[in-house]
Amino acid sequence: MITSSLKMKGGEEMQARLQKLARDLATKRHVKVGFLRDETYDRGDGGARLAERAKTAERDGHPEWAARLAAWAKWAAEHPRSLSVAQVAFWMEFGTRNHGPRPFFRTTIANQSAEWGRVLAQNMVNTKLDVATSLGRTGLRMAEDVRDTINGWPADNSELTHYIKGFNKGLSDSMRLARAVNYEVSS
């Protein structure tokens, strides 16, 4: 029978690093990605745009839209409050009675979440186990992935929405939705 033994000396530095990592993981334990700030859409220009399209709808061959656009313009002028980007994102994600869901957030999670663990692991290596920095870098990547999904959403606007906007690109109008995606490292 052959036996061997191994004796190690030291290890205090490794023990200290592991303890620091455990403390950091306990205090800086997650990253949030989404619409985290109190960002809003300015409703002031919506009524003006609708009013302008109402004036040209009949001339452009859409006479049945003129009255609807004029009514929306009047409503927008009477209700100039801003809309929360988070609220609009919710409506886009899950749909409303007027349009179906555009699940950009769930699509991003389904398509990218497997990669996020690998990104976090690589960030931990690159930052020499700095949890806060690693989570921040991973959050930045996650937010970019959500933005990419929004920006890559297909042309799925109704004919009327296409007319109002002047182009046919789902989830895109002022680009406010994509710009508002953010991340935050929390403890």
Image (cartoon, rainbow, N blue to C red):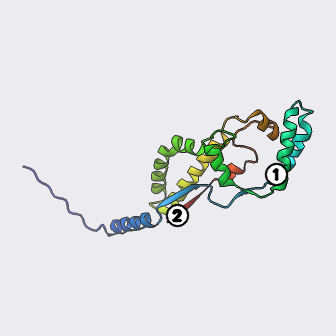
Lateral position of residue 77 relative to residue 112, left or right: right
- The location of residue 155, given as percent across then percent down, is 70, 34
Q: Residue at x 82, y 46 (%)?
A: 72
Lateral position of residue 18 relative to residue 62, left or right: left
Q: Give the SS element for disc 2.
A: strand
Quick one: 139 or 67, which is closer to the camera?
67
Q: Residue furthest left?
A: 1
Q: Give the SS element for disc 1.
A: helix
- The location of residue 96, given as percent across then percent down, is 66, 43
User: Around disc 2, counting alpha carbons within 10 Å, would you say few (fewer than 14), some (14 to 19), or many (20 or more)?
Assistant: few
Label 2 or label 1, whichever comes before in sequence order: 1
- In the image, which is nearer the foreground, mark 2 or mark 1? 1
Query: Three-letter amino acid code at disc 2?
Result: Ser
Q: Residue at x 52, y 61 (%)?
A: 133
Which residue is denoted by mark 2 in the rendering? 186
CA gap between label 2 and label 1 equals: 38 Å
Which residue is denoted by mark 1 in the rendering? 76
- The location of residue 60, given as percent across then percent down, is 90, 32
